[in-house]
Image: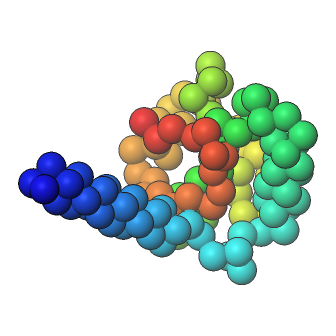
Amino acid sequence: MKKSLILISFTLLFLASCKKKENIEIDTLVPRSEIPVWLINIIEGNEITISLDHWLDSDTGAWLRYKYEKQYYFEYYNALMSSYPPVYNYEGERIMLDQKEFQKYSENKCCRQFVWKGSAYIDY
């Protein structure tokens, strides 16, 4: 009887912790109304690609939004990439930063929020 009670308690605790984690992830996503159209189009394309072949590296990527100097910037992060994540402004223009500018940006950006992440994304 004690083993059954422990097993049931463990199962309920596990389910409760999964639900809590799920809510945290949902709360950190940027609302769709705050995502620029160019990025929505890219994300929709990624989702189509993933639905056709989930083994592609798009499934391990994520789009993140940061605030820097009172502006929003977007980065595509994928652990499989061997370079810095590309940085885009709100209009969708890729920002070309030299090493010094990128370091300043990296040190001063704040307020990380997920815009989208693939189902196989691992946050490091």
Residue occupying the far front of the picture: 1
Tell me residue 96's x, y (percent): 71, 38
Q: Quadrant of the N terminus?
A: bottom left
Picture quadrant where residue 33 is located: bottom right
The residue lying toward the viewer, choosing from 83 and 62, is 62
Whether residue 107 is visible: yes
Task: Tell me the residue at 77%/68% (across/down).
Answer: 36
- Is 67 situated left or right of 35 in this image? left
Residue occupying the far top of the picture: 82
The residue lying toward the viewer, choosing from 117 and 3, is 3
Q: Quadrant of the C terminus?
A: top left
Tell me residue 39's x, y (percent): 79, 59
- Is 106 situated left or right of 56 in this image? left
Task: Tell me the residue at 63%/76% (across/down).
Answer: 31
Tell me residue 30's x, y (percent): 59, 70
Task: Tell me the residue at 57%/29% (across/down).
Answer: 79
Whether residue 69 is visible: no
Task: Tell me the residue at 70%/74% (across/down).
Answer: 32
Residue occupying the far bottom of the picture: 33
Q: Which color scheme did the rendering employ for the protein?
A: rainbow
